[in-house]
Image (cartoon, rainbow, N blue to C red):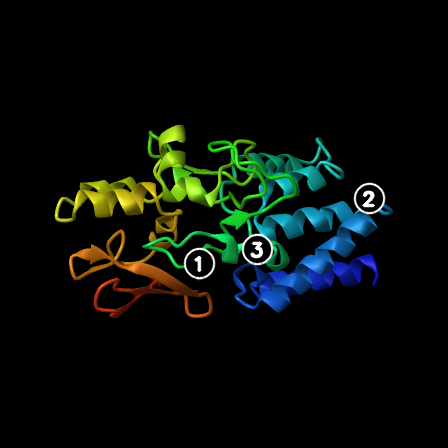
Amino acid sequence: MSFQEDKNQLIEYITQGMRYSENEQELEEFFEFLDRLEAKALMETQYYALVADAYATVVHNPKKAKEAFLKVYDPKNKKDVKKLLDYDRWKGRPVVRPSKRVVKALPQFKYAAAEVLKNKFIKPKGSVCSVCGKKSVPLYIGNAYTASGELTCFADRSDQFCAACIKDGAAAKAFDIRFNSPILEELTAYDADQINELVYRTPECSSAFELCDEDVWPTCCGDFCRYVKYDSGEERFYFQCTRCGREIVWGRED
């Protein structure tokens, strides 16, 4: 394919909303396309612009996008300067390549099903947990709230930690962080153990619900519900009561 054909293909992936795709086969095909773009960039510098756009708009990885963009960056171009600054300000969680997902290796979390955590962990070669020191374990690349309430992403940090250290609370204690909205701690109607389980020992999910015209997290039968599924097509979040099994569905505001 020519440069223009590859550019058109990338635009098609973007307009199709590939970033939100639940189809792992289609998503893996996109990453294979990205592999080819990176290989071509080694031979033709102009391809780095496409690589940067792919990482920025589909993979949502500003660090990788910036690395590629710097290969074609023109400091005299105001648009290029602005784009570079945007990469530095960008916060978010990248899409994990389906072939690198480690859902089956995760412990069971009470308030979040493995299905909704598949983009929050990755097992890179030589992985070591910065908290417990265990090797070859899935490391967290999702978000967390700092002591000041700022949402930060662990995707590009060198001090990543494993799923087990989230589940037992060690990661939250080590970094003085909360994984889900600090507002949940103000819900005095619920048991402290339930709140601590959701805030300190459950991978971050609550920021995805911010555009829903609802509370911070759905509840039923005196407990928080389990987040089980996200439908990207209809932008619906599905929850299930941990006690009676009732299904609760939240949708984003128009």
Front position in the image: 215 or 77: 215
* Cα–Cα span, label 2 and label 1: 40 Å
- Please, what secondary structure does the residue beneath circle 1 have? helix
Q: Position of residue 176 (x, y in %)?
A: 36, 30
Q: Is residue 217 left or right of residue 128?
A: left
Q: Earlier in the sequence, mark 2 or mark 1?
A: 2
Observer-side mark, 2 or 3, equals 3
Front position in the image: 45 or 196: 196
Q: Are marks 3 and 1 in contact (CB under 8 Å)?
A: no
Q: Position of residue 244 (x, y in %)?
A: 21, 68
Q: Which residue is mark 1?
A: 114
Taking 238 as reference, is 34 above or below it?
above
- Please, what secondary structure does the residue beneath circle 3 have? loop
Give the residue type that dot 1 points to. Answer: Ala
Give the residue type that dot 3 points to. Answer: Arg
Q: Are marks 2 and 3 in contact (CB under 8 Å)?
A: no
* Cα–Cα span, label 2 and label 3: 30 Å
Q: Position of residue 55 (x, y in %)?
A: 63, 49
Taking 35 as reference, is 233 above or below it?
below
Give the residue drawn at x 37%, y 53%.
Answer: 109
Q: Position of residue 15 (x, y in %)?
A: 59, 64
- Please, what secondary structure does the residue beneath circle 2 have? loop
* Cα–Cα span, label 3 and label 1: 11 Å
Q: Which residue is mark 2?
A: 45
